[in-house]
């Protein structure tokens, strides 16, 4: 598993993102490349931008009991898995804007470092340790960058 808190691993993610083109096509799934980048940004918006509401207590309990382990472990996501409603992107997005936002979020996360994320609360999953945050960020990025062949 790559480490989102290490500069060299972040540089690899950023290089992969920079290899995307506005007309890149997915190897699987239905998302366009602009929507995929916006979709990846949602994870970081939930940490930094306070624009997403916290799920109700029942949904959080279900997510903690049924989904948390699959989200934060090191096992890669399978192709064509279901997308949580808050991660579904409607309408077209500006490719360059979404790409630049994602790169900025990756750099911010790396600069803040793993200590910033130790015990930090996730909107949906409760408190996570820095390894769980790393796995969630890195696994999600790798899944979608692989989806677009980069």
Image: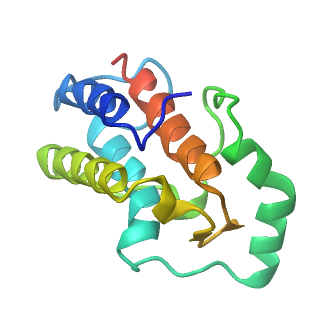
User: Is 87 placed left or right of 6 in the picture?
Assistant: right
Q: Position of residue 119 (x, y in %)?
A: 63, 67
User: Is 50 placed left or right of 102 in the picture?
Assistant: right
Tell me the quarter of the picture where residue 54 sits.
Answer: bottom right
Q: Position of residue 130 (x, y in %)?
A: 58, 53
Q: Position of residue 56 (x, y in %)?
A: 71, 83
Residue 83 in view, yes or no? no
Relative depth, front residue between 101 and 81: 101
State the quadrant of the C terminus. top left
In this view, the residue farthest toward the left is 96
Relative depth, front residue between 81 and 64: 64
Tell me: residue 90, above or below residue 70.
Answer: below
Q: Residue at x 85, y 55 (%)?
A: 66
User: Is 38 placed left or right of 2 in the picture?
Assistant: left
Relative depth, front residue between 66 and 92: 66
Q: Residue at x 35, y 74 (%)?
A: 49
Tell me the quarter of the picture where residue 123 sits.
Answer: bottom right
User: Is 108 placed left or right of 64 in the picture?
Assistant: left
In this view, the residue farthest toward the front is 115
Tell me: residue 141, above or below residue 83.
Answer: above
Q: Position of residue 26 (x, y in %)?
A: 39, 23
State the quadrant of the N terminus. top right
Q: Residue at x 26, y 30 (%)?
A: 11
């Amino acid at each position: 598993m790559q480490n989102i808190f290490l500069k060299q691993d972040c540089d690899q993610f950023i290089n992969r993102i920079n290899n995307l083109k506005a007309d890149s096509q997915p190897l699987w799934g239905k998302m366009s490349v602009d929507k995929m980048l916006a979709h990846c940004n949602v994870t970081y918006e939930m940490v930094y931008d306070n624009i997403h509401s916290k799920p109700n207590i029942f949904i959080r309990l279900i997510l903690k009991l049924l989904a948390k382990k699959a989200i934060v472990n090191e096992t890669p996501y399978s192709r064509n898995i279901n997308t949580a409603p808050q991660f579904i992107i409607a309408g077209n997005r500006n490719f360059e804007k979404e790409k630049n936002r994602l790169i900025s979020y990756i750099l911010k996360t790396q600069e803040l470092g793993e200590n910033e994320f130790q015990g930090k609360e996730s909107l949906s999953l409760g408190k996570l340790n820095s390894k769980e945050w790393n796995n969630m960020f890195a696994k999600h990025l790798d899944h979608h960058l692989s989806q677009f062949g980069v």
